[in-house]
Image (cartoon, rainbow, N blue to C red):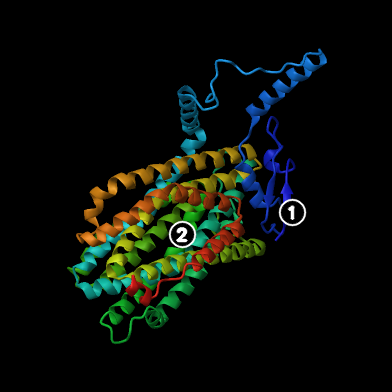
Amino acid sequence: MASALYHQNNPLFHQNNYNYNYFCYSTFLPLKNNNTNYSARLRNTLIKSSRDKNRTVISETSIDNSNSDLGENRVKSPDPDLGPDSDLPSSSSLLDSVSSLLEELKFDGIGWEIMSIALPAALALAADPITSLVDTAFVGHLGSVELAAVGISVSIFNLISKLFNVPLLNVTTSFVAEEQALIAKGRSPDSQRKILLPSVSTSLLLALGLGIAEAVGLSFGSGFLMNTMGISVDSPMRVPAEQFLTMRAFGAPPIVIALAAQGTFRGFKDTKTPLYAVGAGNLLNALLSPILIFPFGLGISGAATAAVISEYLSAFILMWKLNEKVLLIAPDVDVGRFAQYLKSGSLLIGRTLALLITTTLSTAMAAREGPVPMAGHQICVQVWLAVSLLTDALALAGQALLASGVSQGNYGQAREVVYKVLQIGALTGVTLGFSLFVGFEALSGLFSSDSEVLEIARYGTLFVAGSQPINAIAFVLDGLYYGVSDFEFAAYSMAFAFSVTLCKKPPGRKRLEKS
């Protein structure tokens, strides 16, 4: 670990009228290139400029010095009208502070740009969970065995997708935003020619290889995966679960390619095109699924077929629109970029693995408590995931805008993006927390009719609501570190958080019986 002290030489502070008298102690591994350490660069952007304060201090110092030269030593005497509590803020000063905070939170050009990226992204992120709920409703009419089998298969499929596909999505977003911003500096805005971005072609090649590998692994390894999940050969869920997983495996290549394309569009700060593509695919799935399940009598195979067809449609739309902007296949393979993808992707895979293990441990601890606590825990998890969609979208917007600003050397804009997205994130977290605190009681009946389950869920939701401001800031900071391609710190910080969770020993059955 390298330790360095970054001061006014940091490129983010190469502007006049800013206070250079600050310290930023870094304990992160430096990047193995000639660039400034990205961890320090991002953290320095979080240090708010004290321009106005410095001007006041300089002005007062100048007056004092001039008075000293004149032989006048002025000492301020205390105001006799002020009482012992005069240092406490008055109501007017509190109102001024609130007004100042609201003034800073007003949406300017950067604020609106953040929201124009985040809102379509949030809708796209919400599309898949909504479609999964619709599919669950259709499959649920086939029977409990079929529903349980599909649930197991979908869990395995989503686990593989989160572990390998999401890191590719995040890395692609940052790399494409950097390259696109650099090319845009020397390119005419009216130019209609396709641009060549090595990050795009590299990402698509990796996506194709990864998708094929996932399809083969899920198809031929379905039995092994079922054994890993504890589904025995004699279980009535075994055959339908393997059948559904094998068919869904054919949709792995278009899913990974679509995610790589989404990452490219996000790097272009375009989240509307992915929204339309994902929306079209999910709409087709919602229409095809009941037709193939019931009139055609395909059962869960019909549900899997509808999902695969919709995934190919989304991938086709994204690739078609992407082909209008960039050259999909580069004449030469950029080996250096390929290596960067592998390195950054490996770090994020480790980060995702730590996150998945942490959530799995929490579920296991809840399951040890019994079915009722487990059900309450599951409600809290789903509520947390649902309200996290908006903050995740804010992180995405911050990532794309920060990567663009830093790559162009526009550190003033980059600093403004950091401040604004953190402000919006904090406000969003407080709003979500308050909404959960007030509204969960009215909506609790949608989750369960069991009073004991709802009682546990209510207590758990209080924690979920209270942690929303911290949760929002954590999501946003993840996006900002991705924006400066500091995937190392993102991975190491999650590994540290994971190590903390290991200190909490799951309760054993004897302890539970005593309690």
> Which one is in front, 306 or 157?
157
> Which one is in front, 294 or 426?
426
> Which one is in front, 183 or 499?
499
Q: In this view, does 278 lie to the left or right of 239?
A: right
Residue where numbered disc 1 is placed? 34
Q: Indicate which disc residue 46 carries.
A: none
List x then y, in percent, for residue 399: 54, 49
Residue where numbered disc 2 is placed? 259
Q: Which residue type carries mark 1?
A: Asn
**Is residue 332 visible from the viewing direction of this image?**
no
Q: How crowded is mark 1: few (under 14 residues within 10 Å), some or many (20 or more)?
A: few
- The residue depicted at 48 percent of the width and 38 percent of the height is 113
List x then y, in percent, for residue 108: 49, 32
What is the quadrant of the C terminus in the image? bottom left
**Is residue 235 visible from the viewing direction of this image?**
yes
Which type of secondary structure does the marked residue at label 1 adopt? loop
Which type of secondary structure does the marked residue at label 2 adopt? helix
List x then y, in percent, for residue 371: 28, 70
What is the quadrant of the N terminus in the image? bottom right
Q: In this view, does 6 lie above or below 347?
A: above
Q: In which quarter of the image is residue 22?
A: top right
Q: Which of marks 2 and 1 is nearer the N terminus?
A: 1
Q: Which residue type carries mark 2?
A: Leu
- The residue depicted at 64 percent of the width and 32 percent of the height is 50
- The residue depicted at 75 percent of the width and 42 percent of the height is 9
Q: Is residue 88 above or below residue 208?
A: above
- The residue depicted at 52 percent of the width and 70 percent of the height is 209
Q: Is residue 158 above or below residue 51?
A: below
List x then y, in percent, for residue 240: 28, 78
C-alpha distance separating marks 2 and 1: 31 Å
Q: In this view, does 276 lie to the left or right of 479?
A: left
